Image: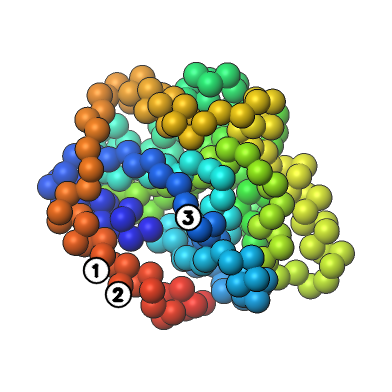
Amino acid sequence: MAVDEAILESASTKTQLPTLRLYDWSPYTLSLGHAQPISDVNLEALKAHQWTLVRRPTGGRAILHADELTYSVCAPIDDPTIYGNVLESYQKISNALLRALEIIGINADSKLKNPGDSHLSHDPVCFQFPSDYEITFQDKKLIGSAQARKKNGVLQHGALPLFGEITRIIDVLNFPDSSSMQDAKDGLINRATTIKDSLVRGISWFELADAISEGFEEKLSINFIKSSLSKQEISKAVHIYREKYTNDAWTMRI
């Protein structure tokens, strides 16, 4: 998360090019949305699983980052590839992700949510219900994304679960009773999926990463330049990590 914020700062000030970053997580980590209450988390269960906790700079609900590919897009707010309001830029990035899935053999969908589903935002699990222009396969959520606009820049990041038990996240969240927890697990099985379950075969992280790069290039009419973090971005990320992401005043603030 600190690296994403560092890249956002360099991209928004145009000291670096707009950036697509692809990464994964070790150890597994539960991430909370920017305004999600810490009371949603069962901290004892999280510790027992030896998973870590982070609060994202973007909104949405809880995601367990495990066995997945995570993407982030950072660009100036006026960059033509993602220019527009939140929904417009969201749709552009969704189109690129849809093309990536098509390349690996998944014909997914992205659409505006039903206005009647607004009450579902109270659920603590991000993958329970799709938001606007989030991606589904056979009516099951496949990619969870969130966007923030700060310092004249846009940061959007999201998770693509490659494989694994989709309900693991329920074990580290708080529910009123065991019946409610089981209902949440059943609901998640019915409403979310993984790349492997959608394809009925597994693919590697690198195969998916290549498809995402190709999908972005095609749909956004761009050409990527592979690079590493600049010295300034590394320094900024270390500073943000130390000052923010290791600080309970941020993680536990709500």
Q: Which mark is residue 239?
A: 1
Picture coordinates of residue 145 (x, y %)?
A: 50, 46
Q: Earlier in the sequence, mark 3 or mark 1?
A: 3
Q: Nearer the viewer, residue 29 or 11?
A: 29
Residue lying at the far bottom in this picture: please name it.
249
In the picture, measured across the screen, residue 3 lies left or right of residue 43, that is left
* Residue at 66% from the left image edge and 44% from the top image edge: 164
Residue 55 visible, this orientation: yes
Residue 97 visible, this orientation: no
Q: Marks 3 and 1, how far apart in space?
A: 20 Å
Q: Earlier in the sequence, mark 2 or mark 3?
A: 3
In the picture, measured across the screen, residue 242 lies left or right of residue 53, that is left
Q: Quadrant of residue 232?
A: bottom left
Disc 2 target residue: 243
* Residue at 48% from the left image edge and 35% from the top image edge: 205
Mark 2, other Cα within 10 Å: few <14 / some 14–19 / many ≥20: few
Picture coordinates of residue 85 (x, y %)?
A: 37, 43
Report the mark closest to the observer, 2 or 3.
Answer: 3
- Colour treatment of the image: rainbow
Please name the amino acid that badge 1 sits on: His
